[in-house]
Amino acid sequence: MSQGTETQVFIKAPLHFTQPYAELLADLPHQNDKGQLIESLRTHRVNTLTELRRIEKVFAYLDQAEVCEPMTSAWAYYVNSNNLLSELRGLTKNYPFSSECLDEAKWRVIEDPSSTRSWNYCWLVLVKIQNE
């Protein structure tokens, strides 16, 4: 490799995202940090799409069973507390996003037996909106 050329290494993680390896390692929490992230999920201190996705990516890479329940609960709280609706409305200012559409999608996810395939309730709801 010639001097001055930079190489980026990408990895494939369980949630199908790619991220530079060094950046991913920087995001990996220490045991104490992981506990703090879990606590922030349980107390809903983290409740934005961006922050939940950041934590989800780290936890998916760690693949530890202890993070499944807090992550699932955090996504459910995010969707059910109308934060998803608020963010969708903020993203679609020219098209007022309907709460009825979101409620219908949530109901369809709950009725769908395959909805247990992900801890990300938000993703499941958005897929229902897109597909139906």
Image: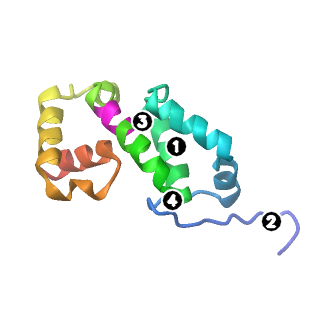
Q: Identify the residue shown where x is 24% and y is 50%.
A: 127
Looking at the rendered structure, the kind of residue marked 3 is: Leu
Looking at the rendered structure, the kind of residue marked 1 is: Ile
Circles 4 and 1 in contact, beta carbons < 8 Å: no
Q: Identify the residue shown where x is 31% and y is 47%.
A: 123
As drawn, the label of residue 49 is: 3
As drawn, the label of residue 84 is: none
Q: Earlier in the sequence, mark 1 or mark 2?
A: 2
Give the residue number, with chain letter if any, for mark 2. Answer: 5
Q: CA distance from mark 1 to mark 2?
A: 31 Å
Q: Nearer the viewer, mark 1 or mark 2?
A: 1
Q: 27 or 66, which is in the foreground?
A: 66
Circles 2 and 3 in contact, beta carbons < 8 Å: no
- Residue 54 screen position, x and y as percent: 52, 43
Q: Nearer the viewer, mark 4 or mark 2?
A: 4
- Residue 2 screen position, x and y as percent: 85, 72
Label 4 Cα crowd, 10 Å radius (few <14 / some 14-19 / many 20+): few
Q: Earlier in the sequence, mark 4 or mark 3?
A: 3
43 sits left or right of 89 in the view: right
Q: Earlier in the sequence, mark 4 or mark 2?
A: 2
- Residue 79 screen position, x and y as percent: 29, 33
76 is within the stretch colored magenta: yes
87 sits left or right of 127 in the view: right
Location of residue 24 (image quadrant): bottom right
Looking at the rendered structure, the kind of residue marked 2 is: Thr
Give the residue number, with chain letter if any, for mark 4. Answer: 63
Q: CA distance from mark 4 to mark 3?
A: 20 Å
